[in-house]
Image (cartoon, rainbow, N blue to C red):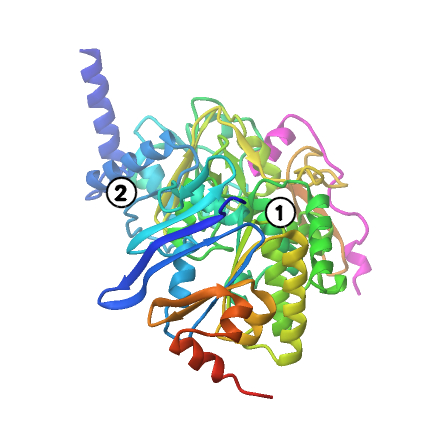
Amino acid sequence: MTKVLLSAKNLSHHYGSQVGCVDVNFDIYPGEVLGVVGESGSGKTTLLKNISGLLRPSSGSVKFDTRVDGLKDIYLLSEPERRLLMRTDWGIIFQNARDGLRMNVSAGANVGERLMAIGARNYGDIRNEATDWLQNVEIGLERIDHYPETFSGGMLQRLQIARNLVTKPRLVFMDEPTSGLDVSVQARLLDLIRGLVSQLSIACVIVSHDLGVMRLLSNRLIVMHQGRVVEQGLTDQVLDDPQHPYTQLLVSSILPV
Amino acid sequence: MKAISGERKRTSRLKEKTLDGYNFAYLDDQTKRMIRRATLKAVAIPGYQVPFGSREMPLPFGWGTGGIQVTASIIGIDDTLKVIDQGADDTTNAVNIRRFFAKTAGVETTENTSDASIIQTRHRIPEVKLKSDQIIVYQVPIPEPLRWIEPREEETRKMHALTEYGVMHVGLYENIAHFGKVTTSYDYPVQVNDHYVMSPSPIPKFDNPKMDKMPALQLFGAGREKRIYAVPPYTKVKSLDFDDHPFEIESWSECCALCGSSSSFLDEVITDDKGSRMFVCSDSNFCADRRAKGHKGPGLPRKFEIKDVE
């Protein structure tokens, strides 16, 4: 039996009297891609923030398999430890690439920043690593010294992925990574993410309302409705044979092409 | 007995020399105590920016209000003050601040670096090595070295506390990527005592090595941004760099046209509209001193003479 990488237990979050998410339980194993689906306002993003250290949940625990001490509650770690974890073992890919990138420094510096943050002090090495990663995400090398604001939406998202994967994280959180991109760019990006995730065996939590994206990327699926997990299981199983009425509704409302 | 008569002498000197109706060194005593407390804290935590209640001074922010407040709080009647601006003693800012303290504190002023007990400076550290009984006060416009990359104060404080300084190297990386070398030439970031990264005020990076293990106490005052920070004597100050692009200072192919020095920081002076130029020491006191000792430089460029001009 492989070790659990991240484990959420009885996770709830309330914004005052508003419900964020209620009583969520799941485990993620190394190399696994977990999808979270649900309509807008169903608590997907709250859940993602809770488990990625950005927002302390009202109750419940989030444990991560740290390299040194094994499974530990991320909110009981000291702040420096948690921030180190976020820069090394974790990656966070935002829906809006501008939130995750530094727009006023070049693409190369964006990729190199995480390396410098963990102590890389050799310009040549940082440059080489940045070059490799830009190639991995199919950004032309002539663009390495250009500013992100000159990039297209798809390129920005790919740059954000390179910036996060450069420290070889073990777990990446993605919040709607493909929304706002046109279909062909989406397809290329999905292909890229799928390739990188399986090649580097990174565990992933992907939040999306797009069931097509989920079918392609995720191994397991969690369906959320009004803050609660109404169904979870293998992706194909959930999508092909939905049990809960809400999941059935969700699956049946995919527009046929 | 002797002490008392000394005290009386001082008081009388103060009375006859300073402006009537003003407190000694302009600031009121409560303000001075507040600034001294901030300064003590700053000295105790080298490189850490201590907030303080900056006062309105009789000159605009950006003209050295931070430095003046620090100087006013540490100056005593027995001190000798030197003020420099861009290395020179005779520029507007330097002359006015010097006169301000001569009027309000009645202290001796000097242009000679080694005679001064307090040196207030903007843009330069004197070429002459400072001694352990001297204090150098810097006027600082922007104290936060992380500000250009991180606009949130809450976040920069956290980054300082946790020594998360990777982003400082992002700036240097950008320099090398775009220009092939680090082009930051002034306000070059330093790390003090292996912890706090500090902005050394707009001194040229030429002066950065002088800050390292300096015997004199270094105080920094930012009036507009309301911060005081310090480097205690003999403290390690390291300029940030990459392993394969080590820190280097500016160098010139010429020497000073007046005193012939090839080891000091040189200013380029345009001497006509046909491209003639000369290089002179930015530290005017250092240059004058050398000339008095008989050193001579190549002088004005000879290339063009008055009769050449039509």
Helix or strand or loop: what does disc 1 sit on? Answer: loop
A8 or A138: nearer the viewer: A8
Q: Residue A110 falls in which quadrant of the image?
A: bottom right
**Residue B166 relative to residue A39: left or right:** right
From this view, report whether residue B46 is shown above or below residue A173: above
* Three-letter amino acid code of the residue under disc 1: Ser
Residue drawn at x 82%, y 59% is B308
Write the start and end of the magenta stretch as one range. Answer: B283-310
Q: Work out how far the residue at label 1 is from the one at label 2, CA to CA, in angstroms.
A: 35 Å
Closest to the observer: B304 or B84? Answer: B84
Residue A18 pos. (x, y %): 26, 69
Which callout, 1 or 2, points to the residue nearer the camera? 1
**Location of residue A163 (image quadrant):** bottom right
Q: Which residue is mark 1?
A: B185
Magenta-span inclusion, residue A141: no
Q: Which residue is mark 2?
A: B26
Which of pointers 1 and 2 lies earlier in the amino acid sequence?
2
